[in-house]
Image: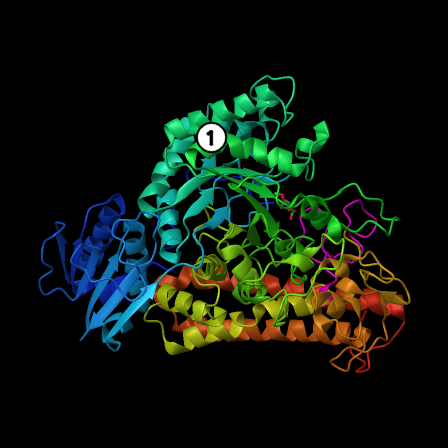
């Protein structure tokens, strides 16, 4: 686990994708900023810094004054600004985060009805660099796909015995907490807020969803400190949320019960919420992990998750607050001998029947896959099973199961695939629900992709990968994941490799062209590479129990966690069909239920998630399952060997001030190669011994 934070570490943080040189194009121009509003001050300070560094000029204009001959004008919409074709022209709308960019003969005007929109417009211009000014004349409107673009931190205030300062954190300590307290110096939080705002993130939950005793108190006597954190985020348009314990009325309030239908409990939550908003008027809301992995919840009182969520929703409703209620609910005390219980079904079984009962300010937060952030899972059917409920997609930027920021794994490609997944697979009309079913087949007409389903609903949430590490993310390349997550929240249709290119261009401005090419070579297909040398064909969870790093094929096989692969001498995989298995495939709308139901039509990469097949089963690729396992594991390691060679050549072209970053990347790649080799040898050896089927190429398997 990560080491506890050192509060005395003074190494300055790497600027990530906002080094001073990323502002050169803006900074060498004549820039005017016009308008009132807290965030306009933030923009003005950014522009002042950039122009001072790069030789341009900066003017702060009063509302209503003329803009003169500036090259770039950043302005709140004023009465005389002609509305664009589709922006409605609504002036001063704080909720409107859109902005307009007008380019006329190289002069650029960015306009927005809100200071947040203007901030996003400013960073848009920074991202474009020279191209912002050299492009053809244009009038463009940019708006985020969803108003809810959030990061969750699994940070503990007090270092946890097992999980450390940051649960599943691989980037050092917490930027919020050290030594059991909220840090006195929150300057790293301010820098972080700036980085996030530049990608479009607008909400952050600041503590672990596993709420331990110390962390629970953030809600009560910790409020002054939470207010300080909120103040650090505020200039960047980011609202703070807290994870709370469902048992708080008992553990903090001394009540005899936390029953969601108890009037005293309801009153306790209302008072608690009132105190929070009195202190932090723009507070966002509460995040709750209930009845999951030992966290308290409504089941203890014979109530369900709608009862639990609505209790908190009523408390925060007068303040326009939100409740993010996690759907990650399953039996973690399963009997591995029992093949009828299927963890993949659990969230659907618990939540689908509750559709329509959640209050309007409850967001059910659904992990992207039915299991738990594996490198490859099908899309959670829950996302389409709650048409009368606000639903958020939950992703994991921290690389718990994807190399723990020791392995270079760019997840933008994976997330893009998830967001583009179409529950109706392009079917012209929604299928007619089967009589009496309450499954996802009755999703309403309208957007049926994951991105479409969450856009006007609960938006996106992801677990952050940032910590107090010099490079923010442990592996410097893992910054690209944080960056891409924010950008995909804004525009889920963005090309993920293009976003990687943006991150490279901003993070390494002016680097020799070979550097960008090398980083693309390493990262573009790195998600697939990781999949090649780890768990095959969607089977998942072949990791060391507890810390989840490195191979252990049977590590979870005979445990209570519900994460099995059922490999024996004849075959491998989980039968989740309706015909002979757990029925999970039937939770999808058509045509996916049919596609997944049959081993003939199930995509290769998910075969073992849905089917138990013999090792000699022939994939669509033409290979047998066993030969696929051997080949992919050899290929995965070969690819990592190439990563190492590519980087060792590229790093010599980096400027001297990137030496620490270069060394860190080299160290991580060395570990990635060691670990990938371990994965290859353990997996191949295990399956050779289990199956007795030799590698057709006769390579060394131990
Ligand atoms: O992936 C699992 C992690 C837990 C985590 C849990 C969750 C915060 O191993 O560490 O707990 O998911 O998402 O709640």
Left or right of 459 on screen, residue 375: right
The residue carrying mark 1 is 181
Query: x%, y% of residue 311?
Result: 57, 31
Q: Is residue 596 above or below residue 482?
A: below
The residue located at (69%, 59%) in the rendering is 441
Colour treatment of the image: rainbow
The residue located at (16%, 67%) in the rendering is 71
Task: Quarter of the image for the N terminus: give it.
Answer: top right
Confirm whether residue 259 shows in the render: yes
Q: Is residue 660 above or below residue 214?
A: below
Q: Quadrant of ligand 1?
A: top right
Magenta stretch bounds: 536-562
* Secondary structure category for the residue under label 1: strand
Closest to the observer, 499 or 309: 309
The residue located at (63%, 57%) in the rendering is 384
Left or right of 566 on screen, residue 125: left
Confirm whether residue 680 shows in the render: no
Instruction: Give the main secondary structure of the magenta stretch.
Output: loop
Closest to the observer, 260 or 12: 260
Left or right of 16 on screen, residue 635: right
Left or right of 481 on screen, residue 592: right
Is 651 inside the magenta-drawn segment? Answer: no
The residue located at (54%, 67%) in the rendering is 413
Task: Quarter of the image for the C terminus: give it.
Answer: bottom right
């Amino acid at each position: 686990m990560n080491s506890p934070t050192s509060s005395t570490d003074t190494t300055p943080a790497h600027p990530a994708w906002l080094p001073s040189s990323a502002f050169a194009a803006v900074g060498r121009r004549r820039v005017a900023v016009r308008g009132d509003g807290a965030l306009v001050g933030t923009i003005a300070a950014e522009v002042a810094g950039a122009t001072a560094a790069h030789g341009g000029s900066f003017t702060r204009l009063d509302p209503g004054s003329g803009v003169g001959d500036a090259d770039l004008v950043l302005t709140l919409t004023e009465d005389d600004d002609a509305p664009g074709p589709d922006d409605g022209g609504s002036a001063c709308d704080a909720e409107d985060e859109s902005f307009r960019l007008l380019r006329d003969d190289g002069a650029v005007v960015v306009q927005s009805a809100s200071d947040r929109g203007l901030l996003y417009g400013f960073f848009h211009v920074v991202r474009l660099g020279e191209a912002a000014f050299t492009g053809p004349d244009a009038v463009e409107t940019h708006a985020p796909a969803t108003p809810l673009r959030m990061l969750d931190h699994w940070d503990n205030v007090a270092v946890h015995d097992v999980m450390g300062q940051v649960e599943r954190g691989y980037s050092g300590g917490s930027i919020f907490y050290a030594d059991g307290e909220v840090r006195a110096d929150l300057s790293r939080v301010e820098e972080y807020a700036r980085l996030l705002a530049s990608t479009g993130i607008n909400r952050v939950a600041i503590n672990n969803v596993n709420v331990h005793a110390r962390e629970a108190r953030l809600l009560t006597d910790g409020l002054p400190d939470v207010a300080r954190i909120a103040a650090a985020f505020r200039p960047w348009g980011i609202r703070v949320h807290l994870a709370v314990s469902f048992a708080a009325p008992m553990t903090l309030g001394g009540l005899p019960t936390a029953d969601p239908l108890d009037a005293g409990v309801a009153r306790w939550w209302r008072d608690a919420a009132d105190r929070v908003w009195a202190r932090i008027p723009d507070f966002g809301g509460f995040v709750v992990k209930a009845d999951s992995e030992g966290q308290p919840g409504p089941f203890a009182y014979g109530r369900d998750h709608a009862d639990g969520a609505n209790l908190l929703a009523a408390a925060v409703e007068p303040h326009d607050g939100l409740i993010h209620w996690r759907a990650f609910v399953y039996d973690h005390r399963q009997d591995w001998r029992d093949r009828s219980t299927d963890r993949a079904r659990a969230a659907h079984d618990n939540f689908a029947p509750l559709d329509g009962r959640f209050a309007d300010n409850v967001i059910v937060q659904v992990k992207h896959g039915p299991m738990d952030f594996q490198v490859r899972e099908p899309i959670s059917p829950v996302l389409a099973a709650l048409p009368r409920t606000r639903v958020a997609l939950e992703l994991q930027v921290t690389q718990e199961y994807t190399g723990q920021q020791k392995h270079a794994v760019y997840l933008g490609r994976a997330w893009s695939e998830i967001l583009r997944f179409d529950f109706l697979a392009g079917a012209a009309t929604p299928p007619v629900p089967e009589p009496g079913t309450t499954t996802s087949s009755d999703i309403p007409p309208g957007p049926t992709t994951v991105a479409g389903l969450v856009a006007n609903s609960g938006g996106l949430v992801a677990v952050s990968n940032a910590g107090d590490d010099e490079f923010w993310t442990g592996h410097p390349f893992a910054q690209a994941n944080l960056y891409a997550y924010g950008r995909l929240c804004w525009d889920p249709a963005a090309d993920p490799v293009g976003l990687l290119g943006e991150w490279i261009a901003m993070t390494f401005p002016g680097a020799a062209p070979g550097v960008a090419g090398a980083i693309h070579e390493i990262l573009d297909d790195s998600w697939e590479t990781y999949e090649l040398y780890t768990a095959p064909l969607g089977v998942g969870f072949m990791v060391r129990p507890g810390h989840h790093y490195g191979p252990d094929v049977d590590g979870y096989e005979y445990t209570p966690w519900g994460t099995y692969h059922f490999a024996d001498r004849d075959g491998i995989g989980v039968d989740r069909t309706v015909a002979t298995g757990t029925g999970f495939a039937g939770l999808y709308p058509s045509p996916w239920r049919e596609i997944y139901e049959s081993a003939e039509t199930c995509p290769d990469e998910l075969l073992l998630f849905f089917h138990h097949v013999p090792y000699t089963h022939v994939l669509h690729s033409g290979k047998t399952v066993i030969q696929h396992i051997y080949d992919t594991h050899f290929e995965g390691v070969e690819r990592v060997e190439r990563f190492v060679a590519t980087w060792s050549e590229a790093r010599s072209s980096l400027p001297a001030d990137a030496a620490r970053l270069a060394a860190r990347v080299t160290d991580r790649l060395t570990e990635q190669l060691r670990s990938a080799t371990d994965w290859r040898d353990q997996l191949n050896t295990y399956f050779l011994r289990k199956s007795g089927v030799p590698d057709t190429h006769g390579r060394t398997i131990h």
